[in-house]
Image (spheres, rainbow, N blue to C red):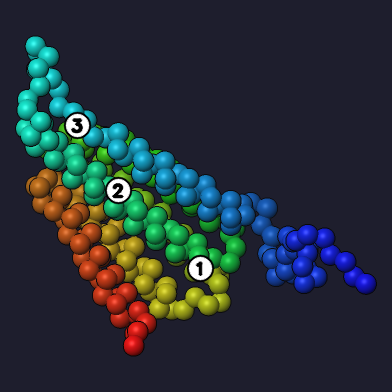
Amino acid sequence: PRCYSLGTKFGRPPYAMSSHHHDHVDRGAISLTRLINISDGVFAVAMTFLAFTVRLPAAAADGSRPPLAETLRQMLPQFYTLGIAFVCAARFWVIHSRIFSFLKRTDGVITTLNLVGLLTLVFLPITGDLIGVYQDQPLAVAMFAGNMALIGLANAAIWVVATRLGLLIDEATRRDIRKGHWFGGLSTGVFALSVPVCWISVRAARWMWLGVILFIFVQRTKHDRRNSPVVD
């Protein structure tokens, strides 16, 4: 009788790879699982560090501080920026997760693009801190918006390259590809457009960020309702 050790149920070794995987080994690539793990870790750390961009207003010369209500009012722009940064970073993480859910494997190009994208993400707490301190300075706003746009561009580059190189799973449809370009490109485009706008009006640039978040939320809600199963 044939005997199988733990993990070899149904006659397959626990870590056996199909011949399809062996035919496409790229020594310059990292396994898909490891690439996803490091990406999730960097996203989590960067999003957590955004909380440190919120600072209390400076105390007066005698060490006194204004009442709590006034302090919170002065901190409102920082809370606004924190919310925008966190929600957009979370949105980019969702897009990133969706992209990698369609990949059947990686190669050296995808690995490099992903690491470059993570580098742009690491700078987010820094640019978020700058805009928290220099709230009305166009340069600080432009650096933050440009940082967000670069994160989106990195995601878009992975999606485009994976599509061109045939790295997507067979189940990925043209509709999935168009949807990936649409939602990722919209937020990236708005942040990129807000860079020149902020030199004219910082407030207008900030409202653009909020507008694209609300628009995407409404569109996603409509999409989910249309595709949700009808319960009798």
| Image coordinates for residue 168, horizontal then vertical, percent | 53, 70
The residue to which callout 1 is attached is: 102
Residue 50 versus residue 111: which sits nearer the camera? 50
Q: Earlier in the sequence, mark 3 or mark 2?
A: 2
Q: Earlier in the sequence, mark 3 or mark 1?
A: 1
Mark 3–mark 2 CB contact (< 8 Å): no
The residue to which callout 3 is attached is: 133
| Image coordinates for residue 93, horizontal then vertical, percent | 40, 55
Identified by mark 1, the residue type is Phe
Report whether 41 appears left or right of 226. right
Identified by mark 3, the residue type is Val
Identified by mark 2, the residue type is Phe
For the question of whether residue 133 can be seen, the reply is yes
Within-10-Å neighbours for mark 2: few <14, some 14–19, many 20+:
many
Report whether 219 appears left or right of 211. right
**Residue at the image point whose x is 88% and y is 66% from the top:** 3
Describe the element under mark 2 as helix, strand or loop: helix
The residue to which callout 2 is attached is: 86
